[in-house]
């Protein structure tokens, strides 16, 4: 059964439109199965099953092989995996990756660091699962992959000359 709460997002699972993922305002994720008569394509029943809790979804995109992207404007977005069997808490969801989100910002203040006299913005972010975020005015480098090459001293990019 589904709680009496507004559905904030849905995503189609199958190309034939028989299964949908539904996300509600509390962050609960459900699967909706449309049972239909294949000769007349008339829906004969609806089956809703609870899958687990995610962040509040603004968009749901079923990628493939049980991998789902939960896009959230209220908290961090998530990449989740749907499992065939529930875990000990009754959830069919495993969080694979979390993508941070600064919004929505409910309050903020500027704080000066005593060590280097640089200012940074501290925000109260998120909706139900809120967090404190520190925003600095510098460029952050996020290393996606690295490899150690023995004997390498320098590396340059070279443009190819074309007429």
Image (cartoon, grey):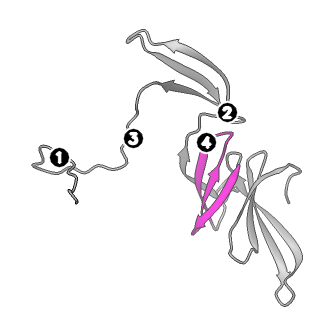
Residue located 63% across and 63% down the image: 62
* Separation of marks 2 and 1 at Cα, in angstroms: 41 Å
Query: What type of secondary structure mainly makes up the magenta span?
Result: strand
Q: Which mark is residue 142?
A: 3
The mark that comes first in sequence, 3 or 2, is 2
Using a 10 Å C-alpha cutoff, classify the residue at mark 3 as few (fewer than 14 neighbours), some (14 to 19) or many (20 or more). Answer: few
Q: Are marks 4 and 1 in contact (CB under 8 Å)?
A: no
Residue 63, percent across and down?
Answer: 58, 64
Q: Quadrant of the N terminus?
A: bottom right
Residue stretch rendered in magenta on the structure: 58-83
Q: Which residue is mark 1?
A: 155
Q: Which mark is residue 76?
A: 4
**Quarter of image, res 33:** bottom right
Q: Are marks 4 and 3 in contact (CB under 8 Å)?
A: no
Mark 2 or 1: the one toward you = 1
Q: Label 1, secondary structure: give it.
A: loop
Residue 159, percent across and down?
Answer: 22, 52
Residue 39, percent across and down?
Answer: 84, 90
Q: Which mark is residue 41?
A: none
């Amino acid at each position: 059964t589904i709680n009496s709460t507004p559905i904030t997002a849905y995503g189609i699972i199958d190309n034939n439109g028989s299964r949908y993922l539904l996300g509600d305002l509390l962050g609960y994720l459900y699967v909706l199965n449309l049972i239909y008569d294949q000769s007349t394509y008339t829906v004969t029943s609806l089956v809703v099953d609870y899958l687990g809790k995610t962040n509040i979804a603004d968009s749901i995109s079923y990628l493939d092989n049980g991998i789902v992207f939960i896009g959230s404007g209220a908290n961090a977005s998530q990449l989740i995996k749907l499992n065939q069997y529930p875990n000990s808490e009754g959830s069919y969801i495993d969080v694979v990756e979390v993508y941070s989100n600064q919004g929505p910002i409910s309050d903020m203040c500027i704080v000066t660091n005593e060590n280097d006299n640089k200012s940074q913005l501290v925000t109260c972010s998120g909706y139900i699962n809120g967090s404190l975020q520190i925003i600095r005015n510098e460029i952050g480098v996020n290393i996606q992959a690295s490899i150690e090459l023995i004997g390498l001293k320098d590396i340059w990019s070279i443009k190819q000359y074309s007429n």
